Image: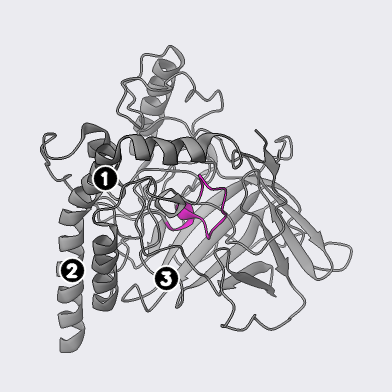
Amino acid sequence: MGCRRLVLIGGSAAVLAVATSVPLAAQAPQATAGSAAAAYTAPRTAWGDPDFEGNWRSLQQIEFERPTGETRAFLTDEEIQAKYAEAERRNALRLTGKLENRGFRNQANYNSVVGYNPEKARIARQTSAIIDPPDGRIPPWTLKQVDYYEFREEMTVGRGDADWTIDRPPSERCLPIVNIPTMGNWGLAHRGTRPKVAAATVGRARLENAQGFKQSEITLDGGASGGGRPGGTQGAYRFVQTPGFIVILKNDYNGQTIPMDGRPAVSKMYRNWRGSQRGHWEGDTLVVVTTNIQYPGPVIDNYQPTYPGTGETLTLTERYTRTGPETLEYRYTVDDPGVYMRPYTARHDFELDNEWKTSYNLCHEGHDDMPSALGSGRYDELTSVDNNTDGRLLRAPRLRDIRAESEAYAEKMKKQ
C-alpha cells in the first residue's frame, strides 16, 4: 500500500462549485444578477496587484439550476428563515444518527452522524447558482452534441462498470480534470418530477444514485443536499500570489498555477484533462480563462456525471472580485458551442477564513481499491454489466427530453 501526495500546481479548472450567498444577517438582494456586488477597492500586494491572498470558503447551499416552476431570482426573508430552521432540524437529527439519509448502495441512515457539521448553516438567497440565462437553467444541447452522447451510450452497451480503469470515475483513479461540481450535471439532471422506473427493471442502488438522475444541492466545500449543512470535505481555497503568477491551492488534487504575465495560450494541438489556464486583471477582478481541455470518454461511467462533450470547444472563464474585507464574489461562464446552444454563467460567494487549515490530499491510487474493483468485476461479470445497464435506463428519459428541448430550441431560433 501507498499513498501519494499530489502537488497542486498544475493547470486545472479552479474552484469546485455550486454554493452562494452570505449569512442572512449580512444578506441583501443583489440589485441585478448580472452586476458585481457594491464597489470595493481591494488592498494591494507589494507589487501593486489586487490582494487575494488567504483562505476563501463558500459554505452555502444552492440549487444549481432554478427549480421547475420558480420564476424568481431570489428568496424572501421568510423563506430563508424557514430553510434555516429546517437545516438546523436536520443537522440535529444527523448528529444523533436519526436523519433518514441514503448512501451509495441505498443504505438507510448511511453516514448520518458523519454528515453532522457544527458550523452554522448558510442559506443562499439566490434561487439558482445560474444567473444567465435569466431563467436560471442550463441552455439546451446542440443537436450534434445529442448525437454524440447517444454514441457514447452505445459505446457503453455490454460493458461492465469494472471492465477496465476507464469504466471507473477519474476521481477514483486520482486523475484531476476540470472538476465536475464546477459545472454541475451539465444538463443531465432530471427536471421536475423524477421518472418512475420500476425497481425490478433498474437496481435499487442505481434508482437513487445513477448519473444524472437528480440534481443535488452542493457547495464549493463539497456539502450534501437535502437542507442540511455542508460537509466541508474540500476545505478552503488558498490563494498565493507572486509577481507574474497566482496559485490556488486546495486539499483535493485539483489546483491551479495561473500565469499572469501575458504569455499566449498554449497551442490547440496540446490538450489535457486539466486544461491550460491564463490569467489577467480587469480592474480589481481576477479573470482566469481555461482552454485546451480534454475530457475522458467515450465510455460513460456511472459514478459521477462526466462532461457530455469532449472539451475541444470548451472555454471556461472564471472571475473573482473582492466585494469587502472578508467577502469575494466568484463567477464562471461555460462557453462551449459544440455542446450548448449558448453560454451560461453561475455566481457564488466566498468568505475569508484564515483559521481554516488546508491539508494535502491522500490519494488511494496504489492501494487495493482499483485491483479489487476490477477483480470483483471478473468474479461477477453479470452484476457489473447490469450496473451500467441500470445507468443507461435511468439516463434514457432525460436524454429523450434533451433531444426534444434541443429540437424545439433550434426550431425557435430558425423563426427569429
Residue 289 or 327: which is nearer the viewer? Answer: 289
Q: CA distance from mark 3 to mark 1?
A: 24 Å
* Nearer to the camera, 124 or 191: 191
Cβ atoms under marks 2 and 3 closer than 8 Å: no
Q: Which residue is mark 2?
A: 403
Quadrant for the C terminus in the image: bottom left
Q: Secondary structure at mark 2?
A: helix
Query: Mark 2 or 1, which is nearer the eye?
Result: 1
Residue 84 shown left or right of residue 234 in the figure: left
Residue highlighted by disc 1? 385
Kindly identify the residue that appears in the image at 18 percent across and 68 percent down.
Answer: 403
- For marks 2 and 3, the one nearer the N-term is 3
Looking at marks 3 and 1 on the same chain, the residue that comes earlier in the sequence is marked by 3
* Above-or-below relation of 61 to 346: above
Residue 98: x percent and y percent? 36, 14
The span shown in magenta is 171-183
Q: Is residue 119 visible?
A: yes
Along the line of sight, the residue nearer the viewer: 394 or 413:
394
Question: Which of the image's four quarters has the N terminus?
Answer: top right
Q: Main secondary structure of the magenta part?
A: loop
Q: Position of residue 177 (x, y in %)?
A: 54, 58
**Residue at screen point 12% across, 39% down:** 201
Q: Amino acid at mark 3?
A: Thr
Kindly identify which numbered label has been placed on residue 310: 3
Q: Dot 2 surroundings within 10 Å: few (below 14), some, or many (20 or more)?
A: some
Q: Residues within 10 Å of mark 3 (few under 14, many from 20)?
A: some
- Would you say residue 53 sits in the magenta stretch? no
CB within 8 Å, label 2 to label 1: no
The kind of residue on which mark 2 rests is: Arg
Q: Residues within 10 Å of mark 1 (few under 14, many from 20)?
A: some
Q: Is residue 140 above or below residue 117?
A: below
Which residue appears at 20% of the width and 80% of the height? Answer: 410
